Image (cartoon, rainbow, N blue to C red):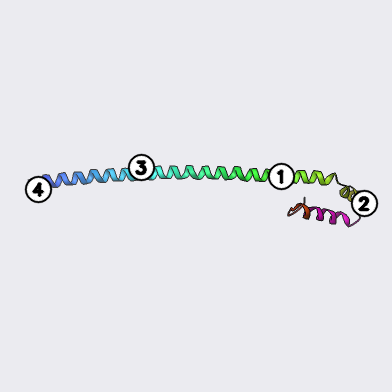
Amino acid sequence: MRLGIRKRIFLNFVLVIMLFGVLCGVLGAWLINRNVLAEAQRRVSLDLRSAWSVLQQEQENLRLFVSILATGKRVEDAYNNPSSGAFRADLEEARLQSGFDFFP
């Protein structure tokens, strides 16, 4: 009988330890998953804010450049005489000077 009780106590301890092990594993995985997702969302949000800031700055630069270019003598002359090929050449020169990839 003593072996039966010892064996039963041992199996109960093993069962309790395994139960707590599984419970801790599930809880740990849930906490890690939640923290990883929260960190990923935070980083994406910060990156998107940075990207929008850069985009808005580039749009402002383009708007300023176009407004300055539109008040220039070259553009006025090109619009007054649109048949000359100088219009496209002047705009291409302005695009190259500004550093833009294309000019709308």
Coordinates of residue 2 in the picture (x, y in percent): 8, 46
Question: Callout 4 environment at 10 Å: few (<14), some (14 to 19), or many (20+)?
Answer: few
Could you give the CA–CA distance between mark 1 and mark 2, rounded to whole angstroms?
Answer: 29 Å
Sooner in the amino-acid sequence: mark 3 or mark 2: 3
Q: Residue at x 81, y 55 (%)?
A: 93
Q: In what element is the residue under mark 4?
A: helix
Q: Nearer the viewer, mark 4 or mark 1?
A: 1
Q: Which region of the structure is painted magenta?
A: 84-95
Sooner in the amino-acid sequence: mark 4 or mark 2: 4
Could you give the CA–CA distance between mark 1 and mark 3, rounded to whole angstroms?
Answer: 48 Å
Could you give the CA–CA distance between mark 3 and mark 2, rounded to whole angstroms?
Answer: 76 Å
The part of the image, by quadrant, that contains residue 19 is top left
53 to the left or right of 64: left
Q: Nearer the viewer, mark 4 or mark 2?
A: 2
Question: Callout 3 environment at 10 Å: few (<14), some (14 to 19), or many (20+)?
Answer: few
Using the image, tell me which numbered label, if any, was put on residue 59. 1
Q: Which residue is mark 4?
A: 3
Q: Which residue is mark 2?
A: 81
Coordinates of residue 12 in the picture (x, y in percent): 19, 44
Q: Residue at x 44, y 43 (%)?
A: 35
Using the image, tell me which numbered label, if any, was put on residue 27. 3
Three-letter amino acid code at the position of disc 3: Leu
83 to the left or right of 53: right
Q: Nearer the viewer, mark 1 or mark 3?
A: 1
Sooner in the amino-acid sequence: mark 1 or mark 3: 3
Q: In what element is the residue under mark 3?
A: helix
Label 3–label 2 contact, CB within 8 A: no
Residues 14 and 98: in front is: 98
Q: Residue at x 30, y 45 (%)?
A: 22
Q: Nearer the viewer, mark 3 or mark 4?
A: 3
Could you give the CA–CA distance between mark 4 and mark 2, rounded to whole angstroms?
Answer: 110 Å
